[in-house]
Amino acid sequence: MAKKMMFKLLSGVAAVTISTAAWAAEADDAEEEDNSGSLALEEIVVTGTSKARSSYFTPGSVSTMSGDDLDRMTASGQADILRNITGIKAEGGGGEVAANVFIKGLPSGGQFQFTPLLYDGVATLSSFGLNSSAFDVYYRNDLGIDRVEFVRGGASNLFGVGSVAGIINYISKTGSDTPEHEVQFEYAEEGRYRADFASSGPLSRDSNLYYAVSGFYRYDEGPLDTGLPTEGYQIRGNLKKEFDDGSGSVTLYTQIIDDEVQFFLPFPLDGSTRERPKGNDGKTVYTLQTFEAAGISYQTPTGVFETPIADGVSTKGESFAIVIEKDVGGGWGFNAKAKYSSYQHQFNLFLDGDGIVNTPETLQGFLTARGLGDISDASFTYTGSGQDVPVGDLLFGNRLLDRNRPVTDFTSEVNLTKEVSTGNFEHSFTLGGFFARAEAGDENVITTYLGEFNNKPRLVDLTYTDGSGNDIVFSRNGVLNAGATYSNNEHSATRFAAYVADQFENDSFVFDIGFRVEKIVGDINREGSVFEQVDNDPNLAPDLQNVKTGNGSFTLASVNDTEWAVAVAALYKVNENLNVYANASRGFFFPEIRSVRINSLGEPSPYEAEIIKQAELGLKYSGERFAATFAGFYAKLDDRASVDFVNDGQGGVINLVSLQSTESYGVEATVSVSIMDNLRFDGNATLQDHKLTKNEGSPALVGNELRRQPNILFNAGLYYDDDTIDFSFFQNYVGDNFANDGNSVELEAFSIFRLDAGYTFDFGGDRNARLGVSVFNLFESQGTTEGSPRQGTAQSGTGAFFVGRPILPRRITVRFNYNF
């Protein structure tokens, strides 16, 4: 498959990179030093560095996206934004949150496993893997974002929360002496309405006090019509005090969120075409999620359980942060950050089958698979109406997974900096410390139900006559298995880190050197479970009589580990237009706390860091009308604790943990061409080869490609903007990849095309308005982004149906934006 991908790349496929102008008032000095006249490499970055500097002179990979581009994507989730960045594969088929983010060369089950998600330099959550919720469930983007930076390589990723695989950092707008106000209204197909605002300016010029506030309200009946609309809002703000002597500032940040969105998992597609199938009614099935399931309830030992599935993925809470920057004189500087957050979070979703058959079944097929006899002895009726289900129709057994996941987090860092001149080199030393503690709950309830095979399916009841002539209720009010699975876990992680770095340069060279040491302590509290009888009616099937619930017995355990990381990087300024750079690092990831297994004696499994070694060698060229980068990379990850959420064969799910090692290498390139004054072409491409070098328990998988990692990624786009008319048309391409580690299911390559166009009305002064239209998935691609993770290596690519998650369908959005 790698050869096929190489052929496609060499056949003239190009790619896209998002470039932006120089940013941030604090970066003025660095901006003045950049005399390269660069087209796409002049971004001033502040992420993971002791001083702002141009990405052109950074000895590593840097990608940014401007606030203007982000404003036009405020309706989109993280995936729609991050998939434009070089070396990132981002899947958003599940909707607005819980993006699956894959970094070049690294394995992942999705989400943000190797890349902390930061806002204003502070992590949304300081530790991943306390539960399986992705970082983006806690924050939403809005008009208050100034830009996003993705930084990899060099010493920068050793600071703060740290990650040698890269850091994603959204930077908020702050106030200035010039007041700025913006409102935006949008409407999208499938009943989406959203209103955004942003305002910033001086609270008191005399006291150098500035404010910025932004937020949104959204109501959405889509992007797929399930009959389960969601709504919510977020408000963010900051208050910045600049010291009168110009030596720094202190900024307070806050966020309040109360938001709900629906999340979409894979469902049965046509097995031959991998496209959305036809339902019993002959109409295309877009989703099998349904408002009918919102009424499911049943008795438990502790009372009546009512599913919260209508709330979808809900987050309600707040965060508070403070950032201090101070130049204390004599080349010394001090900066500190601290944040506290608390969220009531639920992640309620429809799974991708009943965990037994997992695909649509005929009425007789359903009975046979469960040993229930002939259809002549059974009665299938629609819940509520009592109407008979037609004999020729298909049924689909599915599950609700309701997850309650409250979380609290405190994170902080303190850095002492010193600028020193030695010979012809200017040094910027950093000595810093990091502390964080996160606590998260994870209570899970699975309920199995039966429905028809249609959009917004009706629930189905089933009664059959057993061999003794008794009428047995097998599905009541649509419920097949009440409380099929229950788990209740509490996990916490406490992290301590210290780091030192030197970033130094002269007229010809730039060097980064850094070292970090960190300790983590993980605490585990897990409740046992037991089946309890809640109804002794002999005419009920056993799965309706018994409910799995907590037994009140908790297992406590604690794990810890200490590891170190080192990074070195160098850049040589060949001439005004060309730089050569290289970087290498030895780093680590601590295993997810939820991956720790506990034996019958209450002893935790060994807990040891996953070691990653990376290297990169590249070129950066920057001219007036042409800019490009080219780099080769290598990554080796040892003994990663891979956590998979798989079916147990009985309708429940289990966490399957295995140790894996991987190796990868490849090349990536970006290009930006100014075709004319207002028209440019941007592109990027990543070509990689990767394999498993170790797989605990399944050595036969060694040599296989990494799941869901394509050999080729590329983006390509045209962008036009003359301040009155703007237009962009771009493509995101994901090459062939495998759905599982067994490489038994191949997912074909696909492209997503997006169109954005607008007209700006200039009213004079600082007042203008833009009317725009955006089209996601312009050509209605039905590419499959993943198979069924619940089936794991057992999934087959053959059969009448294939359980997979397609790209969300085309959606047209109209926006009106007014600046004043």
Image: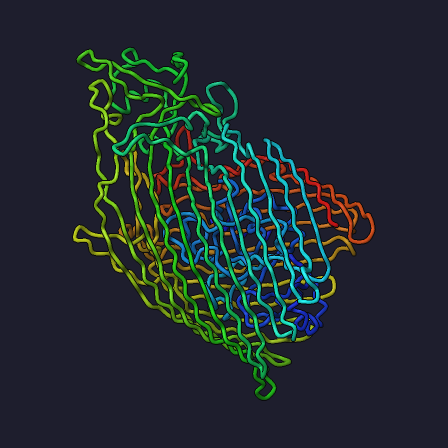
Residue 433 image-quadrant placement: bottom left
Out of 44 and 792, give the one closest to the viewer.
44
Residue 147 image-quadrant placement: bottom right
Left or right: 153 as drawn, with respect to 591: right
Q: Residue furthest right?
A: 764
- State whether residue 270 is above or below residue 79: above
- Residue drawn at point x = 49 percent, y = 51 percent: 318
Residue 672 image-quadrant placement: bottom right
- Residue drawn at point x = 25 percent, y = 35 percent: 548
The picture places residue 628, in percent across and down from the top left corner, at 64, 62
- Residue drawn at point x = 31 percent, y = 59 percent: 522
The picture places residue 252, in percent across and down from the top left corner, at 56, 61
Out of 444 and 506, give the one closest to the viewer.
444
Does residue 180 show up? yes
- State whether residue 247 is above or below residue 634: below
- State whether residue 274 is above or below residue 571: above
Out of 154 and 141, give the one closest to the viewer.
141
